[in-house]
Image (cartoon, grey):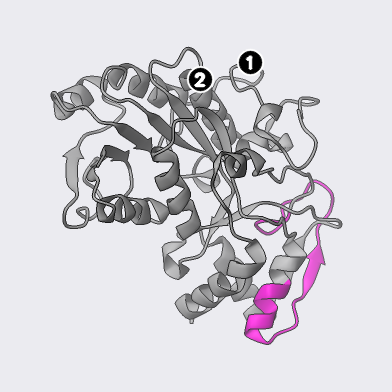
Amino acid sequence: MKRILVIGGSRYFGKSLVTRLRDAGDEVTVLNRGSSAPPPAGVGRILADRDDEAGLREALGRRDFDVVVDQVCYTPRQAAVARRVFAARTGRYVMTSTMEVYDPATLPAGAAPHTVPVTEAALDPTRPPLTPPLPERPGPGPAHTGAHAYAEGKRRAEAVFLSEPPFPYVCVRTAHVLGGGAAEFTGRLAHYVERIGAGRPVDVHEAPYGTSFIHHLEMADFLDWTARQTFTGPVNAASHGAPDVLALGATVAQRLGRRPRYRVVEAGADASPFSFDRAYAMDNGRAEALGFTFGRVTDWLPGAVAETVRATA
């Protein structure tokens, strides 16, 4: 049994993670501001604002943990606070990061550091900042802060922890998470279901690149597994396969029994979610070499589409 603190953990794969840890017999506590529903039975709760260092220390009291899983670290300031507060309180720290840290569109011109598929070693987030300072404004993803700020915020948060970490540290660079129907709060898969179902065109790039995905339950499984390991450093989390937006649209269309329509956007213009004019699909070889076995996108995507169809009906 481990004593595990989950910072966040109130929605989507974070909720599934908390339930898995509890059901495995771990002593699980979630930390949040109290704006979400109470945790499930058998899970403890600490109410605190992670941005308030003094208040966080007071709320934690004398508690310590075998593992901290940080689901909601978006800025270097949040990382710095957590680094100081948990320095003597945990034996392992797992931060949920994102594949967007590799996105060439959010890196300085000429700084794209990789070939595809991208390995963890392709990016060194501890480099000196090459982009303007970011506002210290946390948020749940690109729709909240803008893709550039979201990616750079995650890169800088990783850098804070990776620079002489006071505890064994892992940053999990997650692929695009799908599945769960209405629980998939970003609405990105619903975008395709609604457009294709209504016969409306999906905006795509002329030659879209493939990208990485992972099922929400597989993501919870991976974080659960990572919490119990001893490796450190960055690790990519992605199912096998990197479908492009046309393959995604075809899967949705097959479920709906409709023919998809596509509209090619001009170079540099915005397109539908998961249509990319640059390549940064991830290599999951490190995680597999360490012992985790990923599924294949083609195996679970039809079921994820079906869940979204039911949720949007």
Q: Around disc 2, counting alpha carbons within 10 Å, would you say few (fewer than 14), some (14 to 19), or many (20 or more)?
A: many
Proximity of marks 2 and 1: CB atoms separated by less than 8 Å: no
Q: Is residue 139 above or below residue 231?
A: below
Expressed as whole percent of the image width and height from the top left, the position of residue 72 reads 40, 39
| 2 vs 1, front mark | 2
Question: In terms of sequence position, does the residue under pointer 2 or pointer 1 come before the other?
Answer: 1
Question: What amino acid type is highlighted by mark number 1?
Answer: Arg
Asked whether residue 198 appears in the rendered view, the answer is no
Of the pair 28 and 196, the residue shown nearer to us: 28
Q: Secondary structure at mark 2?
A: helix
Numbered circles on residues, count: 2
- Tell me: 20 left or right of 197: left
Q: Nearer the viewer, residue 142 or 46?
A: 46
User: What's the residue at 58%, 54% (across, down)?
Assistant: 294
- At x 57%, y 52%, the residue is 293
Amino acid type, callout 2: Leu
Residue occupied by mark 1 = 127
244 in the magenta segment: no
Give the structural element (helix, strand or loop) at label 1: loop
Alpha-carbon span between mark 2 and mark 1: 11 Å
Classify 30 as above or below 209.
above
Which span of residues is magenta-colored? Answer: 250-275
Answer with left or right where residue 142 lies relative to residue 58: right
Residue 162's disc is 2
Q: Camera-side residue: 89 or 246?
A: 89
Against 304, residue 35 (above or below) is: above
Q: Residue 308 location, x and y as percent? A: 51, 73
Horizontal and vertical percent position of residue 239: 61, 54
Where is residue 65 drawn, in percent x and y? 25, 30
